[in-house]
Image (cartoon, rainbow, N blue to C red):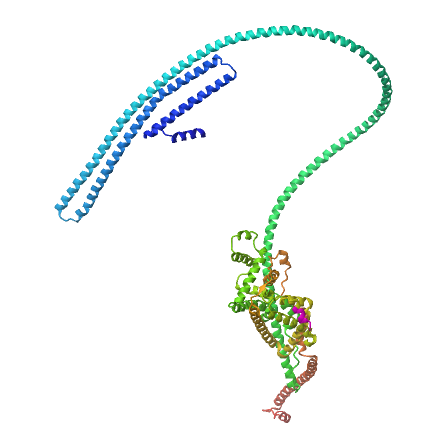
Amino acid sequence: MSSRRSTEIIEELEPQVTSSDPNERKLARRLRIERRWEALKKSKQSVQQVDKLVQGDEEFNEIQIQLKKSAELLEKFLIEGEEYITNVRVANDSREVDRRESEGLNKEKIYEQLDEEAQAASELFNNIANKWASIQRQNDPLQINEAIMEQKEKCDLLISQKDGIIAMLNEELRNADKQFAKDQRKQMEDVNTLSQRIEKQISFMRRAYREELNILENVIQHEREALIEVTDKKWEELFRKRENQEISNSKAKFEQVEEFDQRMESLRMDFQEHFRETKIKLENDIEELQRELEKIKALALLNSEKLDYNYQILKKREDENIIIKSQQKRRMNKLQDVINGLRTKISEYESRMSNKIKKLSESIKKLHKSIIDVEAKADHFAHVNDEKFHMLWEMNKNRTLAVLKKILDTDKILYEQQMGLEWDPPQNFIVDKKSLPSYRLAVNNVPAEFLHDGKSVESRSVGQILSVQTIFQDSESLDSNLQDNSNYMKVLKHILTRISDKSGFLAEKRLKELLKGYTDDQKNIVRLDNVFAAIGIQGIDYINVLFKHFQPYTYCPVCQGSMGTSASRIDSRTSASSQISSIFSRFGDASNFYIPELDDVIDAIRQPDVVLGSIISQLVNTEDLAEEPDSVSEASEHEAIEDICGVAGLEQYFADKTKDKVKAVSSKKKISSMRLTDLSACQFRHPLVISPVYVLRALKEFVASYYVRTSGVPTTGARLEKKRLTISRYLTERDIKTYWEKFRQNFGEDRVRVWNALLEGLKKYHEILKDRRTICDDVMRLRKENAELKRLLANYLDHHEFLTPTCANDRNP
C-alpha cells in the first residue's frame, strides 16, 4: 500500500498530458515515450539473457528460436495495440485542455464584466443613497417629488443593469449546458470507439496468440520426434557396449573362482594345523577353568546363603519400613490437619491482630495527644502549684510576721506596763528564703518560666544577657569605628579571600566546573556566598565579629612580624604576664611571683593572644583558684548586708552590682573594639595579612562561638520522664524547717521563761481575784439578806420607815 501510494504521489507530481500548458503536455508525451522504450529495452534484455543461457548450452533448439520470434512478434502487436488505443485518450485529453482554456477565458471575461458592472452599480447606489439626505433637507413638495422621480429613474436604471447581467449569466449557463451535452456526446463516442478498438485488439491478440501457440506446438512435436530418434540410437549403442562388458566380466569371474579355490585349500591345511594346536591348549585351559569353577561354585553357594540371610533381614526391614511409613503418613495427616487448623487460627489471629493494631494505633495516637495535653496540664499545674506554694509561703510569712509583731508588742507591754522595765528588742534571726542553699540551687537550675521572682532571674541570667548583648554592641562599635579605615577594609578583603580559598569543602562539588569561565573576583564572591550560607552569616555584624576572631592570627609581612605588630606583641606579652601574675596574686603579693624569663619566653614562641590564653588555661586551672575566694567573699558579703540592711537592702545591693557589671563589661568591650580598630594595621600603618594555616582554626572558633545546637522533638519516654523542676520542689525540708525556726529564734528561751513566770504569777493573781470575787458575791448576798431582814423587822414593829444602821452609814459614806 505504501509503494502504491508513493507511485500515485509521483504520478500526481509528474507533468500531465491533460494540462493547459503546451510545454507540460510535450514533456508528458516525451516521458511516456521514454518509458515505452525502457520497457522495450527490458524485454530485449530478458530475451538476450535467454539467448545467453541457450548459448551456454552450446546449441539453439528450434523451440527457443520460435519462442523468441513469437515473443518479439507479440510484443510488437501489443505496442501497436496500445498506441492504437491510447490515441483516443490523447485526443480526448487535448480536447479537454482546449475546453479548459476556452472556459477559463470565458470566466475571466465574465468576471471582468461583473467587476465593471459592480463598480458602476456601487457608484450609482452611492449617488442614490447620498441623494436621500438632500431630499430630506428640502421642504418644497414639488422639488421633493422631482427628486424622488429622479431617484426612481436611477433605481430603475440600476435594476435594468442587474437584469442585463442576470440575462447574460443565464445565457452563459445555457451555453455551458449545451457545451456540456456536446462534450458528453463526444465523450460517449470516444468511449464507444475506445471499446471497439479494445475489442478488436483483444480479438486480434487472441488470434495472434493462438497462431503462435499452434506454431510452437508444431515445433515442439517436430523437436520431440527428432529427440526420440537420437535417444533410440544412443540406447542401442549402449546396449551393445553392456553385452560385451558382461562377457568379459564373466570370463574374469571364472578365473577368480579357480584362484580362490586354490587359496582356500592352502588355507584349510594351515587352519587344521593351527586348530590341532589350539585344541590341545584349550583342553588344558578347560581343566584349569573347571577347577576354578568348582571354587567359584563353593564361593557362590556361600554368597547365596549370605544373600538369603541378608534378603530375609532386608525383607523384615522393608516390612518395618512399610509400617513406619503408614504411621508417618497417619502422623503427617494429623499434622496436616493441625497445620490447617493453625493456619486458620493464624489467619483469624492476623485479622484480629490487624484490627487490634488499628485500635491500638488509634489509642496510641489518642494517648500521645493525651500525653501532650497532660504534659501541658502538668506544666500548668506545676506552675500553678509553684505559684500557690509561693503565695502560701508569703501568706504564712505575713501571718507569722504579724503574730511575731503581736508577740513583740505584747512583750513590750508586759515589760513596760506589767513589770515596769525598759524593753530591749530581741536579735533578728529572720532570713530571706533566697539565701537558702536549696533556693539558690533552684534559681540556677530551674527554667526561667518557673521562676516567679524577676530579680532572681535577672541575677542568674545576667552573664548570658551580657554575653549576648555585648557581642553585638561590640560589632556595632566595630562597624562605627572601622568604616573609615582603609587598612581595615584591606585586611578584611584579605581574610575573605583566604576563607574563599581554604573553605572549598563547604561549597558544592560542581561549583569549580561552573566557575571556570569567570574572573577571580567573581569566583571569590560566589564561593564566599556558599560558605556564608553554610555557616549562617547573614549581615555586616557577623562579618565584624568574624574579623574579631581572625584578627589575633594576623601579622605584618613588611615588618616580618610573626603573628602581629610590635605593639600587638607587647600587648600579648603584657596580657599573658598580667594573666599569670593575676593568678598568683590571689595568694599574696604579685611582685613575689614575678618571673623574669616569662617575657622572653612569650616573645620567643610568638603566638596570638588566643593561643597563649588557651595554653595558660590548660597549664594552670584558674577556675578552682578563682571560684573559692569569690564564692566565700560573696557569701560573707551577702550575709553581712542581709544582717545590716535586711532583704530589701540586699536586693537593692545586687541590682546596683548588676548595673555595675553591665557598665564594666560594656566599657571593656568598647576598649577591645578600639583595640581591634588600632590593630587593623601595624605601627607603621602597614596592612596585616593572615597565614593560610590559621584560617580554618579561626573559622572553627567563630562557628563554635556562635553555633547553637537545637534539640529535636522530645520522645514519649522523654516526655514521661521529664521532671518539672520548680523552686518549691527544689526546696528541702531541712531548709524549710530552718527558715521557719528562725522566726522562733527571734523570741528566745529567756523571754519564754519570763512569760512562763509571769503566767504563773498571773495565774496566782487570777486565783486571788477569783477568791475576791467569791467574797464580793458573799458580801452582796449578805447585804440582800440584811435588807430583807430589815424589811421583815420593820413590818413586825409597825414602823412606817426603815431605820438605817450605823454600820451602813460607815460603809456607804
Q: Where is residue 285 in the image (x, y as percent from the top left)?
A: 85, 18
Closer to the camera, 216 or 718?
Answer: 216
Residue 439 sits above or below residue 294 on the image: below
Horizontal side of 335 relative to 190 (left or right) equals right
Residue 549 sits above or below residue 45 on the image: below
| Residue 593: quadrant of the picture | bottom right
Find out whether residue 601 is within the magenta segment: yes
Pick the quarter of the image with the N terminus: top left
Find out whether residue 71 is within the magenta segment: no
Residue 179 sits above or below residue 72 on the image: below
Closer to the camera, 673 or 464?
Answer: 673
Q: Give the range drawn in magenta.
A: 596-603
User: Which residue occupies the extreme left position in the image?
Assistant: 142
Q: Position of residue 704 (x, y in %)?
A: 61, 62
Q: Where is residue 813 in the image (x, y as percent from the top left)?
A: 61, 93
Prevailing SS of the magenta stretch: helix
Q: Which residue is drawn at 55% across and 8% down?
A: 231
Q: Position of residue 36 (x, y in %)?
A: 40, 23
Q: Residue at x 34, y 27 (%)?
A: 26
Horizontal side of 407 relative to 300 (left or right) equals left
Horizontal side of 670 relative to 180 (left or right) equals right
